[in-house]
Every structure is written in structure tokens, then in C-alpha cells.
Image: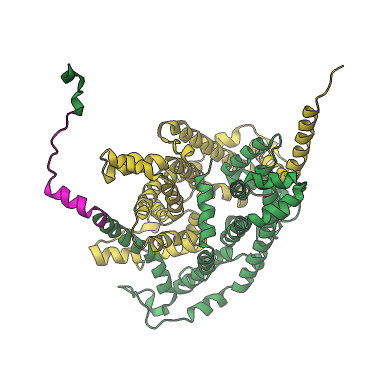
């Protein structure tokens, strides 16, 4: 006969107790993840292979045709994809460069740091709708402040900005730089975590300020940059509200501001083409996954995690 | 023999006399650097403030000064009347009330549902906990668009479309971002504290309500602020689910106002300011909490 040791019995009872309370306390989220994430994800995947309109709720299985129609036959889809990728490709790196740049300057022990920080952060607080409306007026070709200043200071005739198909996307990229403050706050916190000893060591080795920044500061905050890159990618591919408000939803001028999420929204809630819209959502998801994977893949080469133990 | 033992590098080189500029730089380095950074930061700060200035200036202009060339920087006179006019133009207070109703219920929802999950993640070592936590992180990367359509279909089957329930009910089932944020806060409370309470025979419920919740009040304040701001600024949610003007939130209402009165710039700017001001006031009250919330998720993330 085998003896069950008291110790083992106690640990197994402990484990069962922990499982009970662990699941009990996590139960709202367990339910939530099933109801509001897992089920919708599966359902949306299924819908993406069907022709499904809310008016005619009979779902017809159509195989991959939603996907192939979008990718090979739909010019608007391709254009909206191009617009969103354009936005991501320009706004993310610029956002990182400007954000890190401002954070580096603010991290020096200079006077008025708190004031600067507030000024750079304030735009982040403006609700998207208010911001979009404000920017339409700021970039107004005739009476906007930007073209006024360009003329009064440099005698330059400014472009039509949001009214010009050529300039509209650069304009929204510029606008995205206005809210770089969110990133600045995160970079600043990262910068304050860089141990002083590293700077002292660099000093002993005769490094100048520029070398210290490039060889100590930047490597030490690469994990923070990495995080912001991934979040920026996910966010910018879903870029919606500001462009929707600026253009009233139709992406004027000439669909130059018709972004991916706007076309998806239109297919789903204006045309009620739920199957097509679901396929669009999945293509977006796959792009996000591939992008994240790529960033992760390269991260071993440039993200430095050595500081973790020091914390 | 001894000569050979001395490595080449060890021979002390006579120090080169640094140039005049280098010496000046060394002496005034910190001053020069401060002046340089101010000379970048000040113009940049002005650029960042110009849109705000333009918003305020336009909101106070009489109609005749809006479309003028060259533009008027400081309106003369200040037309304070634009503000009441803007507020009366749209059912402003009704929109505010709607937004506050949604926000209050949503706040109650996240307060009820998120802290216990964070407690489970940070204090109870149960099998499967780490898997669920990884899934929680993963859902933050899931684009909203993927779940948007099936959720809309569920809510329309339930007959909830057009009302506030689709904007409120999900908050009672936790949110990945808040759970993550709270868990990070909870991790900073020493494990010994809860272990000691456990040894003293306190139940998990008691440790949670009487020890953890009071200790993590700042974290709870953070999610209240974040959720309020999210509801106040939310556009896509109300756009999908609300279809009668009486139910509109303030963000959606402002957009509708713009579509109808696209050139009433003074009123539009006044409205935008009114929409933004509560957020800025709130920010100044809870600045520390706010910044902490952002950095905690941004820094210790992934």
C-alpha cells in the first residue's frame, strides 16, 4: 500500500484552493474574453467566408471570394490600404524621432522642464473630434493660420493642405506629430531609468555628450522605443476618427484620405456587407501580426534589455 | 627585460593642449547646452501652442473678422456671446448628460470588473494564470475592427442598438488595458503583506477588499480617469451604436454640428473648446496619476 505524504496532500489542497479563488476573481474577465473577444474573433473569421448582409441574414458560404475580390478586384480597397500604409510608414518613424528628440532635450536638467512637458502634452488631451475640426481650420488654404504664417514670415504661398490630394496625407502625418506628447512622457520615464553610473563610466572613457547620447542613452531606451513602435503600428493601421471627421467619412479629396478603417466601416455600416467587412478586418489583423512579428524578429539586433537587472 | 614588460600603451603620452574652442566648450558646456536646447524647445513649444491660440482667438471673433486677410490675431472686440450661441446651437447639455450617463456606468463597470482580475493575476498563483495573462496582453494587439462586426450583430439581435447598453455592458466584463495597468500597480505591493494576512487566516475576499483595494486607491483613480476620458472622447462606439440625435454623445454631436454648419468657425471653435476644457481641467487635477498611468503601461510593457 502506498502512503500519500501529508506534504503532497497539503500542496494539492493548496493548489485546488488557489485555482478556485484565482478563477473566481478572474471570472469577470474570463467571461469577458469569451463573450467579447473569443466568440467575436471566431465569428468574424467565419463571416469573412460568407456573403452576409444584415437585411438578408442567411449566410451564404462563398469561400475565399471576399478576400480575392478585395485584393484583386477592388480599387477602393487597394487605395485605402495604400493610404493607411502610407500613414503608418511616415507617422511612426517621424513620431519616434520627434518624440525621442524632445524627450532627450527635456531630460537635460534645464529650467522650465515642467512647463515644456505640459505644453507638449496638452494636445494629447484634445478629443479627436475637436482636434479634427481645429485642424481643418488651422490648415484652411485661405484663412488658416499655417498659410498665413507662411506668407507673413517667408512670403511662401502655402499649398491647399487638406484640400489638395497631393498634400492631404502629409498634412495628417504632420498632425500626428502634434500629439507626440504621449510618447514623450513614456520616453522621459525611460530616460530617467538610465543609471547614472553608465554616464559616469562613459565620462571616464572620454565620451562627449553626443557619444553618450548615441552609445548610452539611446541603447538604454530601445525597449521603450520598441514598445512604442508596436503600439504605433497597431494604432496607425486603424487610423479612423480624425480622417473620418475631417472628410465627413468619404475621404475627400479624391479618396486621398480614405483610410483602411473608413472603408471597412463603410462596408459594414453603410452597405451592410458584413462578410466583406469581416474579411477586411482579418486582412488588417494579419497585417498587424506580420508587422509585429517583423519588429520582434529584428528586435534582437537593436533592442537592449541589459538594464532590466539593474532596476 | 624590464623594458619589454612595459606594454606600449602604458607609456604616458604628453597631453595635447586642447584648442581654444574646446577649452571654451569645456568651461561653459552646461550653459551652452542649456541655451541650445532652449533655442530648440521654445520655438517648438510656440508651434505646438499656435493651434490652441488660433482656436481660442477664432472662438472669440465677430463674424466679420473670421474671413479677413490678413487674419486678425486678437479679435476686437471679444465676442463672448459665441459661447452661449454655440451651446444653444446644438442640444449641448443633453449631449453632455448622455455622455456622463454612459461614462458613469462604464466607470462603475470597470471598477467592479477589473481590480479582482488584477488581484487574481498578481496575488493568487493558480494553474493557467500565466496563460490567461498572456492572452490578456494579446487581446490588446487585436484590432477593434475584428470584433466590431460580430458584436454589432449580437447587440442588434438583443435589440440594444440605438441605446447605451452596447457601450456600457462590455465594461462590466473587464478590459485588457486596465487589468494590465492594475496588475502592474498591484505587483508593487509587497507579497509579504498579503502572505502575512493569509497566515493570519484572512480569506481572499477579505485580503482583497480590506487590504489591496485601500492600498491601490491611486491605481483605481487612474482607471476612473482613463475610462472617463475614453468615454468623453469616444467617437467610433457612439457612431456605430447611436442613431437618434437625442441619444448622441458630445463627440458625435459636435461632428453632426460640423456637417451641418461647416463654416460657422467661431461657433465650431467655441464648441471644441467647451469639449476640451473639462479634459484639461481634469488633467491638471490628476496630473501625477495620469502620467503614472501612461508610463506604467508604456515602460514595463510587454
Q: Is A79 left or right of B74, judged from the image as shown? A: right
Q: Position of residue A101 (x, y in %)?
A: 35, 50
Q: Nearer the viewer, residue B118 or A57?
A: B118
Q: Residue at x 49, y 46 (%)?
A: B299
Chain depicted in yellow: A
Stretch of the chain drawn in magenta: B11-31
In the depicted view, which residue is nearer to us: B135 or B78? Answer: B135
Q: Nearer the viewer, residue B97 or A296?
A: A296
Magenta segment includes B49: no
Please give the name of the residue rendered at 45% of the width and 53% of the height, measured from the top-left corner.
A185
Is B20 within the magenta? Answer: yes
Residue A31 visible in rendering: no
Position of the C terminus of chain B, as image quadrant, is top right
Question: Furthest-front residue in view?
Answer: B2
Which residue occupies 47% across, 72% down?
B264
Which chain wears green?
Answer: B
Q: Position of residue A258 (x, y in %)?
A: 48, 50
Residue A186 visible here = yes
Q: Nearer the viewer, residue A80 or B57?
A: B57
Amino acid at each position: 500500500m502506498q502512503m500519500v505524504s501529508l506534504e503532497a496532500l497539503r500542496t494539492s489542497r493548496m493548489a485546488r484552493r488557489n485555482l478556485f479563488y484565482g478563477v473566481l476573481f478572474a471570472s469577470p474577465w474570463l467571461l469577458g474574453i469569451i463573450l467579447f473577444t473569443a466568440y467575436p474573433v471566431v465569428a468574424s473569421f467565419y463571416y469573412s467566408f460568407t456573403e452576409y448582409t444584415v437585411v438578408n441574414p442567411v449566410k451564404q458560404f462563398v469561400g475565399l471570394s471576399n478576400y480575392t475580390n478585395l485584393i484583386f478586384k477592388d480599387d477602393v480597397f487597394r487605395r485605402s490600404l495604400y493610404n493607411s500604409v502610407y500613414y503608418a510608414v511616415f507617422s511612426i518613424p517621424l513620431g519616434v524621432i520627434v518624440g525621442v528628440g524632445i524627450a532627450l532635450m527635456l531630460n537635460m536638467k534645464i529650467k522650465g522642464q515642467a512647463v515644456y512637458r505640459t505644453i507638449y502634452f496638452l494636445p494629447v488631451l484634445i478629443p479627436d473630434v475637436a482636434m479634427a475640426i481645429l485642424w481643418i481650420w488651422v490648415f484652411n488654404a485661405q484663412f488658416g493660420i499655417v498659410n498665413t504664417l507662411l506668407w507673413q514670415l517667408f512670403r511662401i504661398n502655402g499649398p491647399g493642405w487638406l484640400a489638395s490630394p497631393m498634400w492631404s496625407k502629409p498634412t495628417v502625418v504632420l498632425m500626428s506629430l502634434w500629439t507626440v506628447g504621449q510618447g514623450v512622457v513614456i520616453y522621459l520615464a525611460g530616460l530617467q531609468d538610465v543609471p547614472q553610473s553608465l554616464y559616469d563610466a562613459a565620462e571616464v572613457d572620454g565620451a562627449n555628450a553626443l557619444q553618450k547620447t548615441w552609445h548610452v542613452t539611446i541603447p538604454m531606451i530601445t525597449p521603450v522605443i520598441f514598445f512604442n513602435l508596436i503600439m504605433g503600428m497597431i494604432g496607425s493601421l486603424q487610423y479612423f476618427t480624425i480622417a473620418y471627421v475631417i472628410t465627413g467619412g468619404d475621404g475627400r479629396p479624391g479618396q486621398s484620405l480614405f483610410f483602411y478603417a473608413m472603408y471597412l466601416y463603410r462596408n459594414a455600416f453603410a452597405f451592410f456587407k458584413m462578410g466583406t467587412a469581416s474579411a477586411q478586418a482579418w486582412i488588417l489583423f494579419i497585417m498587424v501580426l506580420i508587422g509585429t512579428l517583423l519588429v520582434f524578429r529584428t528586435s534582437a539586433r537593436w533592442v537592449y534589455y541589459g538594464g532590466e537587472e539593474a532596476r | 627585460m624590464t623594458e619589454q614588460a612595459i606594454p606600449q600603451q602604458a607609456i604616458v603620452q604628453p597631453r595635447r593642449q586642447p584648442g581654444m574652442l574646446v577649452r571654451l566648450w569645456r568651461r561653459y558646456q552646461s550653459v551652452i547646452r542649456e541655451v541650445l536646447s532652449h533655442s530648440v524647445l521654445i520655438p517648438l513649444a510656440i508651434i505646438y501652442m499656435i493651434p490652441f491660440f488660433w482656436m481660442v482667438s477664432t472662438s472669440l471673433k465677430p463674424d466679420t473678422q473670421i474671413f479677413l486677410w490678413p487674419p486678425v490675431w486678437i479679435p476686437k472686440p471679444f465676442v463672448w456671446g459665441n459661447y452661449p450661441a454655440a451651446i444653444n446651437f446644438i442640444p449641448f447639455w443633453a449631449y453632455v448628460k448622455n455622455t456622463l450617463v454612459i461614462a458613469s456606468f462604464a466607470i462603475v463597470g470597470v471598477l467592479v470588473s477589473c481590480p479582482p482580475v488584477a488581484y487574481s493575476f498578481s496575488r493568487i498563483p493558480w494553474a493557467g494564470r500565466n496563460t490567461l495573462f498572456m492572452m490578456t496582453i494579446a487581446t490588446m494587439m487585436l484590432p477593434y475592427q475584428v470584433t466590431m462586426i460580430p458584436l454589432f450583430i449580437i447587440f442588434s439581435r438583443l435589440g440594444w442598438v440605438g441605446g447605451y447598453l452596447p457601450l456600457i455592458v462590455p465594461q462590466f466584463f473587464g478590459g485588457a488595458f486596465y487589468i494590465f495597468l492594475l496588475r502592474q500597480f498591484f505587483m508593487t505591493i509587497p507579497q509579504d503583506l498579503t502572505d502575512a494576512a493569509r497566515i493570519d487566516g484572512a480569506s481572499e475576499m477579505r485580503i482583497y477588499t480590506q487590504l489591496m483595494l485601500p492600498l491601490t486607491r491611486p491605481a483605481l483613480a487612474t482607471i476612473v480617469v482613463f475610462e472617463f476620458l475614453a468615454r468623453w472622447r469616444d467617437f467610433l462606439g457612439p457612431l456605430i451604436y447611436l442613431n437618434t440625435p437625442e441619444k448622441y454623445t458630445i463627440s458625435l454631436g459636435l461632428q453632426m454640428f460640423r456637417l451641418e454648419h461647416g463654416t460657422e468657425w467661431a461657433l465650431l471653435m467655441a464648441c471644441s473648446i467647451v469639449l476640451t476644457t473639462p479634459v484639461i481641467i481634469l488633467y491638471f487635477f490628476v496630473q501625477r496619476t495620469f502620467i503614472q498611468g501612461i508610463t506604467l503601461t508604456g515602460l514595463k510593457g510587454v
